[in-house]
Amino acid sequence: VVGVIGNGLVILVIARSKDMRTVTNVYVVNMAVTDFAYLVFSVPPAAIVFAASEWPLGEAMCK
Protein backbone atom coordinates (compact mmCIF):
# COMPACT_ATOMS: atom_id res chain seq x y z
CA VAL A 1 0.00 0.00 0.00
CA VAL A 2 2.80 2.41 0.91
CA GLY A 3 4.68 1.62 -2.30
CA VAL A 4 1.65 2.18 -4.50
CA ILE A 5 0.88 5.51 -2.84
CA GLY A 6 4.52 6.64 -2.85
CA ASN A 7 5.14 5.74 -6.47
CA GLY A 8 1.84 7.29 -7.48
CA LEU A 9 2.79 10.54 -5.79
CA VAL A 10 6.21 10.60 -7.46
CA ILE A 11 4.61 10.08 -10.86
CA LEU A 12 1.93 12.69 -10.18
CA VAL A 13 4.30 15.39 -8.91
CA ILE A 14 6.78 15.03 -11.75
CA ALA A 15 4.05 14.80 -14.40
CA ARG A 16 2.20 17.90 -13.19
CA SER A 17 5.18 20.20 -12.68
CA LYS A 18 6.96 21.39 -15.83
CA ASP A 19 10.01 22.42 -13.80
CA MET A 20 10.45 18.83 -12.63
CA ARG A 21 10.69 17.40 -16.16
CA THR A 22 14.42 16.82 -16.37
CA VAL A 23 16.32 13.86 -17.77
CA THR A 24 17.04 12.61 -14.26
CA ASN A 25 13.41 12.87 -13.22
CA VAL A 26 12.28 11.04 -16.37
CA TYR A 27 14.49 8.19 -15.16
CA VAL A 28 12.96 8.44 -11.67
CA VAL A 29 9.44 8.31 -13.16
CA ASN A 30 10.46 5.32 -15.26
CA MET A 31 11.64 3.53 -12.11
CA ALA A 32 8.46 4.51 -10.25
CA VAL A 33 6.25 3.20 -13.07
CA THR A 34 8.16 -0.08 -13.13
CA ASP A 35 7.92 -0.47 -9.36
CA PHE A 36 4.23 0.49 -9.43
CA ALA A 37 3.53 -2.18 -12.08
CA TYR A 38 5.43 -4.78 -10.06
CA LEU A 39 3.49 -3.94 -6.91
CA VAL A 40 0.14 -4.08 -8.69
CA PHE A 41 0.68 -7.23 -10.78
CA SER A 42 3.13 -9.42 -8.82
CA VAL A 43 2.56 -8.84 -5.13
CA PRO A 44 -1.19 -9.68 -4.91
CA PRO A 45 -0.83 -13.20 -6.41
CA ALA A 46 2.14 -13.88 -4.13
CA ALA A 47 0.14 -12.69 -1.11
CA ILE A 48 -2.73 -15.00 -2.09
CA VAL A 49 -0.39 -17.99 -2.29
CA PHE A 50 1.21 -17.20 1.07
CA ALA A 51 -2.17 -16.70 2.75
CA ALA A 52 -3.79 -19.82 1.30
CA SER A 53 -0.70 -22.10 1.33
CA GLU A 54 -1.75 -23.30 -2.13
CA TRP A 55 -2.80 -21.86 -5.49
CA PRO A 56 -6.51 -21.07 -5.05
CA LEU A 57 -7.08 -19.41 -8.43
CA GLY A 58 -7.41 -22.59 -10.49
CA GLU A 59 -5.61 -24.05 -13.47
CA ALA A 60 -6.45 -21.16 -15.83
CA MET A 61 -4.64 -18.58 -13.68
CA CYS A 62 -1.67 -20.90 -13.19
CA LYS A 63 -0.56 -20.71 -16.82
Image: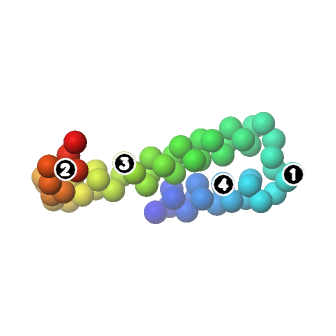
Examine the rendering and report whether any part of residue 55 can be seen.
no
Q: Report the front residue among 51 and 59.
A: 59
Q: Report the front residue among 42 and 58.
A: 58
Q: Residue at x 63, y 41 (%)?
A: 30
- Separation of marks 1 and 2 at Cα, in angstroms: 47 Å
Q: Report the front residue among 39 and 56.
A: 56
Q: Which tag is nearer the camera, tag 1 or tag 2?
A: 2
Mark 3 element type: loop
Q: Callout 2: 10 Å neighbours few (<14), some, many (20+)?
A: few
For badge 2, the amino acid type reads Ala
Q: Which residue is mark 3?
A: 42
Q: Which residue is mark 1?
A: 19
Mark 1 element type: helix
Mark 4 element type: helix
For badge 1, the amino acid type reads Asp
Residue 36 as seen in the image, left or right of residue 11: left
Q: Residue at x 74, y 55 (%)?
A: 15
Q: Which residue is mark 2?
A: 60
- Measured as percent of width and height from the top left, residue 49 is found at 21, 53
- Separation of marks 3 and 2 at Cα, in angstroms: 17 Å
